Image: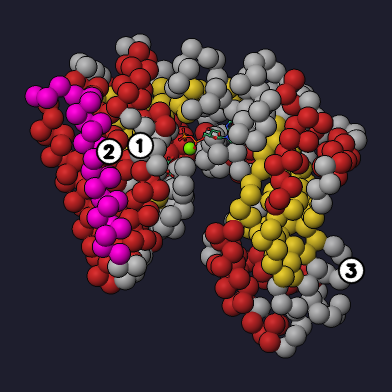
């Protein structure tokens, strides 16, 4: 299909009836000119509310559950009443009720058994996306724009890693094309749930928090779209998180690799794996502000000839540094490191950076704080004998650290840049704990004390003159 556009609207972009109206308007404008499929997140804060409800259920807190369910119902019922003329309320309110009751039933099961199995969480947590797809599609239809709400369980096929599944592109391509192309050919706009998917045998999965960006890129690749537009609440991808660095500027253009590094190292504006499905076909992505759609946004392209130095700085506060050291130099540090990494890979812990030093064979690595427990269990299992016999010292965990990453294709060969970055951080009296640089020289990753993280981000942003790099300040 020629010139197909995929758009994704984030939680704030569909966060109320007013925002849904704007989103539908932006979609309708494009749909008048070209085939369009849209992917929607849950209304802002709804996913947190759903997860919280399931925690109440597991803990047997019936009052907490009931209060959350009431909030869930009223937010969507209100949006329905504000969006649609009264004559169209009934079927949509009935569908909202059906979706909320399905969710309530799963929570009831969790409450009865005092468990919260990842499989059931994945089935239940996508309720937010189902509700917003329902509302946006109903509104588009009410405006005379033919649209249909679609559940991505029928479109995206993944592995069975519940909570953080990965797409299987061949079956996804087949399913997505079979279901979506006939609709698009008839001029009907699919309004697809972001965030969720299913295994080949139909078990519901999700793609990780913030995963609607990833859903949209998976579908854009599967449908051979010509572009993907990601609508969010800032003017594009910026040289730093504007909440930390007020002088951050919007980047006009960045490469896939830069965007992926930024996202991977904590820039919430994109889900970390968004660019991966697009690389083969080089589908361009725009990050745009649904609150200021007239602004240009950031274009993310496969590669760029401009060598621009350090482009952006990002950070991640909720991380922990784990250190391991053989107790005697006879035991190979590389061997211990191999076993440790293998154990972490098997339980799907993402290692954000590794740093090692030769002689004593000690090494440290960074993981997300919420994956620390799994990390410790995996190490305990894989190296049980070594710990028991004292061949490897017990792991040391430092949770009071943060990660900062400086990203830019043009950093390669820029002499003295790393030194300037370290000096700028030290000048703020922030201790540098570990440093890692990938072989691509695209990113310098620095671990600092957590209480100095924000200061360090601002210092690096200033030192590298990132605020002057491009056009408009946010
Ligand atoms: P959505 O709900 O639209 O997916 P998110 O909240 O997931 O939006 O992501 C957008 C937010 O990402 C912005 O509001 C901003 O605070 C944050 N952010 C962090 N780093 C950056 C960055 N480098 N550029 C732009 N925004 C960033
Ligand atoms: N609603 C999901 C979340 O909050 C997915 C997304 O917003 O992208 O994580
Ligand atoms: Mg997001």
Do the residues under discs 3 and 2 have CB atoms within 8 angstroms? no
Which residue, given by chain and number where applicable, does mark 1 sit on? 43
Q: Residue at x 42, y 39 (%)?
A: 212
289 inside magenta stretch:
no
Which residue, given by chain and number where applicable, does mark 3 sit on? 359
> Separation of disc 1 and disc 3 at Cα?
53 Å
Magenta: predominant secondary structure element?
A: helix
Q: Residue at x 28, y 24 (%)?
A: 189
Which residue, given by chain and number where applicable, does mark 2 sit on? 75
In the image shown, does 208 or 77 lie closer to the viewer? 77
- The answer to whether residue 61 shows anywhere in this view is yes
Q: Earlier in the sequence, mark 1 or mark 3?
A: 1
How many marks the image carries: the answer is 3
Horizontal side of residue 461 vs 149, given as left or right = right
Q: Earlier in the sequence, mark 3 or mark 2?
A: 2
> Separation of disc 1 and disc 2 at Cα?
9 Å
Label 1 CB sits under 8 Å from any ligand 2 atom: no
State the image coordinates of residue 282 (x, y, percent, origin top left): 55, 28
């Amino acid at each position: 299909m020629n010139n197909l556009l995929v758009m994704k609207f984030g939680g704030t972009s569909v966060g109320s009836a007013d925002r849904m109206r704007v989103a539908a308007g932006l979609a309708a404008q494009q749909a008048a000119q070209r085939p369009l499929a849209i992917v929607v997140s849950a209304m802002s804060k709804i996913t947190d509310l759903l997860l919280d409800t399931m925690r109440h259920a597991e803990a047997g807190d019936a009052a907490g559950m009931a209060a959350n369910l009431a909030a869930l119902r009223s937010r969507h019922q209100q949006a329905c009443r504000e969006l649609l003329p009264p004559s169209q309320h009934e079927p949509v309110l009935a569908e909202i009720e059906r979706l909320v009751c399905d969710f309530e039933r799963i929570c009831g099961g969790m409450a009865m058994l005092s468990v919260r199995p990842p499989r059931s969480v994945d089935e239940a947590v996508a309720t937010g996306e189902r509700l917003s797809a329902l509302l946006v599609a109903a509104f588009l239809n009410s405006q005379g724009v033919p649209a249909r709400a679609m559940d991505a369980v029928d479109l995206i096929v993944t592995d069975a890693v519940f909570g953080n599944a990965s797409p299987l592109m061949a079956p996804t391509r087949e399913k997505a094309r079979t279901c979506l192309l006939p609709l698009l050919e008839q001029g009907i706009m699919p309004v697809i749930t972001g965030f969720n998917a299913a295994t080949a045998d139909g078990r519901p999965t999700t793609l990780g928090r913030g995963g609607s960006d990833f859903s949209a890129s998976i579908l854009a690749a599967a449908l051979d779209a010509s572009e993907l537009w990601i609508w969010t609440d800032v003017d594009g991808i910026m040289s730093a998180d504007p909440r930390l660095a007020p002088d951050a500027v919007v980047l006009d253009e960045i490469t896939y690799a830069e965007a992926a590094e930024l996202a991977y190292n904590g820039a919430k504006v994109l889900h970390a794996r968004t660019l991966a499905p697009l690389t083969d076909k080089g589908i361009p992505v725009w990050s745009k502000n649904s609150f200021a759609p007239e602004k240009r946004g950031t274009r993310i392209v496969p590669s760029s000839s401009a060598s621009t130095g350090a482009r952006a700085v990002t950070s991640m506060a909720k991380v922990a540094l784990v250190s391991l050291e053989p107790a005697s130099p006879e035991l190979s540090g590389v061997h211990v490191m191999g076993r440790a990494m293998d154990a972490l890979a098997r339980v799907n812990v993402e290692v954000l950076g590794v740093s090692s030093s030769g002689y004593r064979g000690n090494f440290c690595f960074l993981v997300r704080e919420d994956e620390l427990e799994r990390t410790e269990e995996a190490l305990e299992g894989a190296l049980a004998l070594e710990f028991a016999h004292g061949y490897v010292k017990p792991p040391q965990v430092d949770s009071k650290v943060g990660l900062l990453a400086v990203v830019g294709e043009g950093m390669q060969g820029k002499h003295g840049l790393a030194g300037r970055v370290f000096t700028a951080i030290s000048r703020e009296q922030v201790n540098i704990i570990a440093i890692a640089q990938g072989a691509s020289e695209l990113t310098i990753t620095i671990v600092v004390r957590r209480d100095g993280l924000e200061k360090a981000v601002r210092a690096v942003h200033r030192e590298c003159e990132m605020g002057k790099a491009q056009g408009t300040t946010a």
